[in-house]
Amino acid sequence: MREILGRRRKLSLQLPRKGRTALLSAALTYAEQWKWRVVPGVGYDRRGTWRATGAQPCACPRPNCPVPGVHPLDPGLLAATRDPRMVRWWWTNRPDAPVVLATGDRVSAASLPAAAGAHALTAIEHFGFRLGPVVATPTRYIFLVAPYSLAELGELLDSQEWVPTSLRYHGDGGYVALPPSSGNSGQLRWVREPVVEPGESAPWLPQISTLVDAMVRAGRTAPDGDRLTY
């Protein structure tokens, strides 16, 4: 069944103001305007040893970190907030820190390897389903969706014959990075920008039930793995 799209508007992130970095501006938009909880990512080791490979190593003490640079460390994920005063303090002191979104409250997500994610995006739009915001990292596509429970997710996946492990779910207690953060091998970007409906204060988000079939099918073509490298 095709969805008839109504009129809507895009809300672009605020442009940097004097004395404010692009990352701080984005973090304030997410937290203050959209009421999404954010926390700074740990960032990268800037000592220059990464230049031979082009991929920056994580600044955390974990060897072979599975999500280099774009995971919380100090403060941890539980400190994620909507408080603009805390956001300003964090990014004033660490202006290059990636913006990490705590999922499961106002917004959740599901992600696929980049090639499979692009296929899923095309299939979802082909069948007339409306997408919410979609983030492209150098290696993955992240589909932002309305919050879902583990029970709801389990029911949806139980109806599938097989679910690829390359398809990851970011719900309560999870996190994803958002633009304009940089991953360890490149910049994050919106492939579908957030859309705020008239009269609303935050972007519209689809239910995961409208996307999961296409994401499972696309994920079957992607290699499995245990690293969520950004």
Image (cartoon, grey):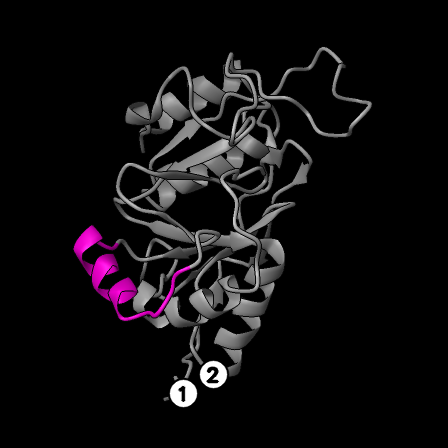
Q: Quadrant of the C terminus?
A: top right
Q: Nearer the viewer, residue 160 or 98?
A: 160
Q: Which amino acid does the dot numbered 2 rest on?
A: Phe
Q: Which amino acid does the dot numbered 1 rest on?
A: Arg
Magenta span of residues: 148-163
In the image, which disc is placed on residue 127? 2
- Identify which residue is drawn at 33% across, 54% down: 201
Q: Are marks 1 and 2 in contact (CB under 8 Å)?
A: yes
**Residue 146 position within the rendered picture, expressed as x and y whole percent measured from the top left:** 30, 57
Residue 207 in view (yes/no): no
Separation of residues labelled 1 and 2 (CA atoms): 6 Å
- Identify which residue is drawn at 49% across, 33% down: 99
Q: Quadrant of the N terminus?
A: bottom left
Taking the magenta stretch, the answer to whether it contains residue 59 is no
Q: Secondary structure at mark 2?
A: loop
Task: Tell whether 112 sits left or right of 157.
Answer: right
Q: Nearer the viewer, residue 230 or 156?
A: 156
Q: Which residue is mark 1?
A: 2
* Mark closest to the chain's N terminus, 1 or 2: 1
